[in-house]
Image (cartoon, grey):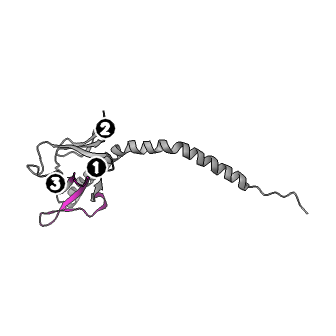
Amino acid sequence: MNRGTHKAGFTLLELLLVMLLIAVAAAIVAPSFSGFSRGRRLPNTAIALVTTARWSRVQALTEGVTYRLRIDRGNRQWFAEKQDENGQFVVSDRDMGKEHVLPEGIDFGAITFEKNFADGDQQGEFVTFKSGGRTDVATIRLESDRTQFVDVANDMPLGTFHIVKTVTQ
């Protein structure tokens, strides 16, 4: 009879102590993570806006139809519109083109247009992407509590949107 056999493992008390240490460490670190995510809202929103603008341009080129990036200040959102066969603009049914709502604490600032190369005079707050690749030259400002700004812009009619500058006051 072999009474000396012992299985390796952890006791319940050891497991509880390790879990308690992990909980204490998480409680200490959690407040700093919330500040980190709040500080990333504006840059992440700017990246999402650039992504939608670039997607709209690619869709216009590949589908051979005009797209617009619509800025809706009243509802604090942006979305892509596609020109249908009747010449009307309808909200895109694709995921990338659907409504993107601004996070809390972020708003649209000034939106400036240089000479509109795609449609002549600007009629509303939208950026036009033509099927031939031409795009409005525009700058869209995103503001975070009036203390931080990010400008998203397209500098050339055949260029793509990108983040131009971030300013903290």
Tell me the element at label 1.
Answer: helix
Q: Which residue is mark 3?
A: 130
Q: Disc 3 versus disc 1: distance between alpha carbons? A: 18 Å
Q: Residues within 10 Å of mark 3 (few under 14, many from 20)?
A: many
- Tell me which numbered mark, 1 or 2, is placed earlier along the sequence: 1
From the viewer's perspective, is 119 left or right of 69? left
Q: Disc 2 versus disc 3: distance between alpha carbons? A: 32 Å
Q: Which residue is mark 1?
A: 49
Range of residues picked out in magenta: 70-96
- Residue at (16%, 65%) from the top-left corner? 84
Q: Residue 86 in magenta?
A: yes
Q: Nearest to the eye among marks 2 and 3: give it.
A: 2
Tell me the element at label 2.
Answer: strand
- Tell me which numbered mark, 3 or 1, is placed earlier along the sequence: 1
Tell me which amino acid carries mark 3: Lys
From the viewer's perspective, is 10 left or right of 120? right
Q: Which residue is mark 2?
A: 148
Residue in the foreground of this view, choosing between 69 and 110: 110
Quarter of the image where the N terminus is located: bottom right
- Residue at (30%, 37%) from the top-left corner? 147
- Residue at (31%, 38%) from the top-left corner? 148
Residue in the foreground of this view, choosing between 45 and 64: 45
Tell me which amino acid carries mark 2: Gln
Return the residue found at the far right.
1
| Rendering quarter of residue 137 | top left
Q: CB atoms at circles 1 and 2 under 8 Å apart?
A: no
